[in-house]
Image (cartoon, rainbow, N blue to C red):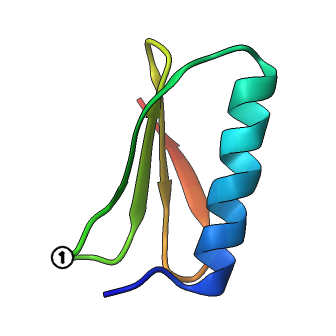
Amino acid sequence: MLPTAEQGIMCVTLCQSITNMFTLIAVVRLDERTGNIFILAGDNIQIEIFRNDRRRFLE
């Protein structure tokens, strides 16, 4: 399964925003079961990007 074009753009945009805050990105992963992209950055930033281009910040 490949990410959608919208997911890819959102992923790059969010990663660029995160690095602008001088925060390290530890993991960017495509969940092959759901097709969602998961980003883990810094000590507590967790973001999930859904296939419909929506995103949510996890705690």
What's the amino acid at mark 1?
Answer: Arg
Q: Secondary structure at mark 1?
A: loop
Specify whether 31 is left or right of 33: right
Tell me which residue sits at (40%, 84%) in the image.
2
Tell me which residue sits at (64%, 84%) in the image.
5
Q: Position of residue 46 (x, y in %)?
A: 45, 35
Tell me which residue sits at (76%, 53%) in the image.
13
Judging depth in this view, the residue of 15 and 54 nearest the camera is 15
Specify whether 25 is left or right of 33: right
Note whether 35 is above or below 57 in the view shown: below
Note whether 46 is above or below 33 in the view shown: above
Judging depth in this view, the residue of 12 and 52 nearest the camera is 12
Figure quadrant of the N terminus:
bottom left
Figure quadrant of the C terminus:
top left
Note whether 7 is above or below 40 in the view shown: below
Q: Position of residue 35 (x, y in %)?
A: 34, 77
Q: Residue furthest left?
A: 33
Q: How many marks?
A: 1
Tell me which residue sits at (43%, 62%) in the image.
37
Note whether 4 is above or below 13 in the view shown: below
Q: Position of residue 29 (x, y in %)?
A: 35, 54
Q: Would you call the spot at circle 1 few (<14 residues within 10 Å), some (14-19), or many (20 or more)? A: few
Q: Which residue is mark 1?
A: 33
Q: Position of residue 28 (x, y in %)?
A: 42, 47
> Which quadrant of the figure has residue 52?
bottom right
